[in-house]
Every structure is written in C-alpha cells, then in structure tokens.
Image (cartoon, rainbow, N blue to C red):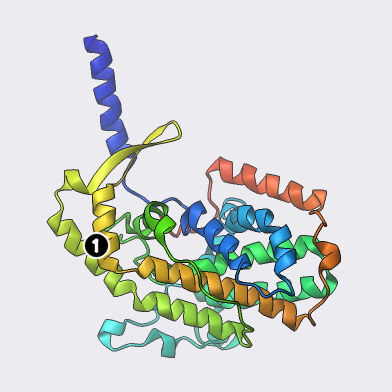
Amino acid sequence: MIKKILISFLTLLLLNWILLPRPTALSWGFYGHKKINRLAVFTLPEQILPFYKSHIEFITEHAVDPDKRRYAVEGEAAHHYIDIDHYGDLKKGENPFEIVPKTWKDAVQKFTEDTLLEYGIVPWWIPKVYYRLVKAFEEKNIDKILRYSADIGHYIGDAHVPLHTTENYNGQLTGQKGIHGLWESRLPELFADNYDFWTGKATYRKNILNEAWDAVYGSHMAMDSVLTIERELTEEFPTDKKFTYETRGRVLVKTYSKEFADAYHQRLNGMVERRMRRAIITVGSIWYSAWVKAGMPQLKELENATPSKELLEEEKQLDNAFSSGKIKGREHEE
C-alpha cells in the first residue's frame, strides 16, 4: 500500500516538472481553426454557398493541415506569424508598420529574404495562397480548391491572433510563458459556445495584401492588453488557484484553471470573440474574392465531386508526420 502511494506521489511530481503550462503547438488550437473555417462557409453568397456547404466537412477537418505540415515541411512555420515588433517598438516611438514595406519585393530589398523568413511572413503568404486558389478556381480543380480554401482559412486565422505578431509570442520574454495557449486555445474551448458568430455576408476584397496587413495590425494593437491583463491577474491569483490538472485522453496535463481563464476572459472584454469574428468574415470574403477573380466559374458539377486518392494519401502522410511529434523549423508557440 505504502509502495503504491509513493509511486503515485512520485508520478505527480514528475508530471508537475514535465508538463509545464504551455499552449498546444497548434495556433488557435484545432478547435478554433476548425470553427473559423466551418463558420466562414455560412458567410458566402448564394452563387458559391452550395459548393462550400457540400464540402464543409473537408474544409473544416483540414483547417489544421498547415499546422500538421509544420511537422513535415521545413520552413512551414514562418507562414504562420510575423514578429512585427522585431522591426520597431511602438513604445519607443517606432512604428514597425511604417518601417516594414508592405510588398514582398520591397521588404526583401530592405531586409533580405532570410531575415523575413526568420521573423515570419504571414502577411505575404496569405496573398500567395490566394492566387493559388484563384488558379484552382480557373482550372476547376477540386483538389486544389479544397486544399487552398482550407489552407488560406488557417493562415488568415493565424493573422488574427495577437501573439502571432510578436517576438514575445509565448510570454517567454516577460515571465508569462504559456499565455499563447491560454489566449488562443484555452479561452475559445471554454467560452466560444457563447460567442455570437453572426458576421453578415462575405464581400469582395480587391486588395488581399492589404487585408492581410490589416489583420496583423489589428492583432498587434491588442498585444499590450493581452500581456498586461494576464500579468495583473497573476498578481491577484495564488499559484495553486491559477493552474489545475486535467485529463486529456489518457494524459494528465497542467493547464490554467477555469477560474483564472474566466477572469482573464472577462477582463479581455470580448477580444477573443472579436478576433474570431473578424477572422471568419475575412476567410469567407477571401474565398469569395478568389472565385470572383477567377471569373465566377460555375461550380455545380463540383458539388458532388470527391477529392482524389492522391490528395487523401497526402493527408494521411501529414497525419503520420504530425504523430511523430518532430516539428521542422521554428516552434513558434512553444
């Protein structure tokens, strides 16, 4: 009996040491990305709504493929963020949004491609995937339409996360490690069922580069509140009240308590809901814009089409790479 108690005690100590509070390695969490892509379908106008509704399960489930790809493709991580404050600190009177050129060509000339890749390229990557989606619509290629629709939804979602716009991406520079997962995974999972996700109908967006930069700007403007509010709450909460243990599958993990998450959520005053809503309408609008840009092709014959065996096999390979747990390139959230 004593031996069993001792083993249980040592096991808990080991878990407390290993399973530090941390986010999932996946931006917005699987839950958030799937929610954004799924709800974006319902923002679409009647001309393309039937096509997207008929493939809503694929677009929902594969919203997380870009995160899985980070375990299979070197350099994928840079597509998910931009450490805009690397280029200038607003608190010091430096405006990085004026320092960093908006176009890729001008940015490369000023900073070099290696530098840009090191600090993230999400605002330039979104237009790149957009033009791939336009081409897919022009070709009426069902595999590519589904893949790029799911992918661009993911990257747009990432651009709407404040902690995807800073070098202090997980609070590691300010003693707040774990805040990434708290903001973008823990809060949506606990509270998103009560959010109002009616965003109105998607609209045509002429300049996708500007849309991407607007998303990054809106996210970065929220950064100060994201960090300050968590810091203030931490001073108010005893450590044993800030964290708790929960069972995830068969694993006991250390995470933020519901009480702390609720207090943080309330003081953020709807921030997470606003960023998710903005992501949803932007995703729908960019899908719609790509279709318009492609000449508004008829999609009726593609509504009942199924992805090719080749595409499905690629997805299996992504799942296998993800299961390996060996990320390639920078682990941005950890």
Q: Is residue 33 left or right of residue 134?
A: left
Residue 293 at x, y percent in the picture = 74, 83
In the picture, measured across the screen, residue 10 lies left or right of residue 208, that is: left
The kind of residue on which mark 1 rests is Glu
Query: Which residue is at 36% across, 87% downward?
Result: 95
Residue 119 in view in this figure: no
Residue 146: x and y in percent read 72, 62
Q: Which residue is depicted at the point 43% across and 81% down? A: 217
The answer to whether residue 295 is left or right of residue 74 is right
Secondary element type, mark 1 = helix
Q: Where the C terminus falls, by quadrant? A: bottom left
Position of 315 compared to 89: left or right? right
Q: Residue at x 53, y 58 (%)?
A: 35
Quick one: quadrant of the N terminus?
top left
Q: Residue pushed farthest top? A: 1
Residue under label 1, please give it. Answer: 230
Quadrant assignment, res 109? bottom right
Vertical placement of residue 99 versus 328, above or below: below
